[in-house]
Image: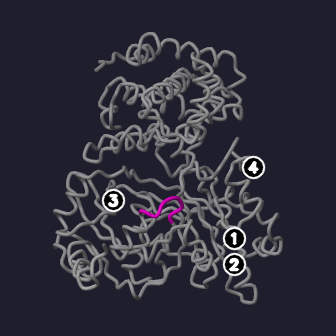
Amino acid sequence: MPAPPLCQQINEDIANMTTLNRSTLSTLGKQVSTPQYHSQDVSSGILHFGVGNFHRAHQAVYCDALLNLKDLQWGITGVSMRSPDVRDVLRKQDYYYTLALIDQNTEYRVIGALQRVLFAVEECGEILKQFAKQETQLITTTITEKGYCLAHGKLDLEHVSIKHDMASIQAPQSIYGYLAAGLIERFSACRSTENGQLTILCCDNISAGGEIIESGVKALLEIHNTDTLAWLNTNVSFISSMVDRVTPADSEAFTEQVKEVLGVEDNAAVSTEPFSQWVIEDNFAGKRPDFDKVGAVFSKDVGAFERVKLRFLNAAHTMLSILGYLADDEYIHQALQRKAFAQFTRDVLIEEVLPVTSVSSEINAHDYIDSIFARFANARLPYKVMQVGTDSSQKIQQRLFPSVDASLAQEQDTDGLAFILAAWVCFIRKALDQGDLNDVQKEQFNERLSSNKSFDLLHCLSIAQVHQCEFINDEIFIKKLIDFRAQIDKNGIFETINTLSTKEVELT
């Protein structure tokens, strides 16, 4: 039976005194930094889709820094797309949570930029109202690669969520549906004023994300509301950004560690590295937050930064996750401790990727590569290989495929790239066999395995949209893939990778 009202109130009061929230904020130790502003003074100038760990460790931290400078218009209303869990946890904490910067020493900081979180499935109406508000100046997204519903680098018109939203956006299922429905509300509320301008900013690891979002939204508005589409063309900008910060999934041990430091529970704490980078395309339609005052960079050429991050840092992360899983390592830093894996990954970046990648004069490529390995080696910030390996069929399309095509076009060496793609097929097969695979294409991989016991390499790559690439037609390269796959199956990952090294490598 439910507790009587008085007992229920007492229980709630006790919970409030033992949980991070507005009332316990002043009780935290001096080693914990807290917001230098009052949440009631903050307005939500930003509507953000995807309030996972990365957003809370990256964009929300930049907003928190702006709020600490008393620029109080850049609070965030967050939207959880798939689950109410983040909303429910943060609501109990008045939307405060702890950021732990983990290096030789750990720094703790309470972030207060989130003003509220809405669950898309249950609170669509409230989300659309947020679009219509004049104070909303910026819409941002961190929904991961699979949330963009792409095929061959373009909107997948056969995707179930896209087909749903093409039929109706009364209860959207895709990011494009929510944005299209929201922009219709914005147009209706703002067309009689001069203050309706709005910027939509992609903050995911996806090349030209702003253009992809724009294309999808316009496709839906062409169907559902052409008046909004015409208004959009002169009042809304879709822009991209390059984001970078390692943010692993957190454990129960981490939560207990935060509780010990704070003296209260925080069930939404996130851990991350000290390094953080955010390069934002400088093409805002409405107000532009002064993110450059708190460490971000505005640029007219975000693509140059995106390309370097995807082809070096993200590619290295994916390579180490593949190799580590095949070697039964749990974490990226453990894979990197294997000299064979570290040498191989560095050789591929320097000898195969760098010669075919245009690097901005603002970036020292060799220093950048060195920093990648230094960051990944941080054992105090353990990042699971299978977290990196999540949705790898989507990730390799941007992280590895373009380098292969570019290398072949310029007649450069491709042995390392061929090897890692062959290893990826072995990774998929092993993850399927052991029940570890977390991939948007898992059902297709399972169907392929059940109908073809040999799990053909080309069929596996086709699920990852390899046919959008030129290298699928290069017979010599494809033969390399097939040969490496056979060698890994026969001799194992260690012996096979050692045949690629030009240096003496100690296998562990």
Quadrant of residue 99 within the rendered picture:
bottom left
The kind of secondary structure the magenta stretch mainly shows is loop
Residue 157 is marked as 4
Relative image position of residue 302 (x, y in whole percent): 59, 56
Q: Amino acid at mark 4?
A: Leu
Q: Eyeballing the image, is 133 above or below 293?
A: below
Q: Residue at x 46, y 33 (%)?
A: 319
Residue 2 appears left or right of 224: left
Which region is colored magenta?
A: 80-85
Q: Circle 3 is placed at which residue position? A: 270
Q: Amino acid at mark 2?
A: Glu
Outermost residue toward the front?
1
Q: Pointer 2 and pointer 1: residues touching (CB < 8 Å)?
A: yes
- The CA span between labels 2 and 4 is 24 Å
- The CA span between labels 4 and 1 is 18 Å
Residue 14 is marked as none
* Camera-side mark, 3 or 2: 2
Q: Pointer 4 and pointer 1: residues touching (CB < 8 Å)?
A: no
Q: Circle 1 is placed at which residue position? A: 181
Q: Earlier in the sequence, mark 4 or mark 3?
A: 4
Q: Pointer 2 and pointer 4: residues touching (CB < 8 Å)?
A: no
Q: Quick one: 96 or 284, which is closer to the camera? A: 96
- The CA span between labels 1 and 3 is 32 Å
Per the image, is 154 magenta?
no
Label 2, secondary structure: give it.
helix
Q: Amino acid at mark 1?
A: Ala
Quadrant of residue 218 within the rendered picture:
bottom right
Q: Circle 2 is placed at which residue position? A: 185
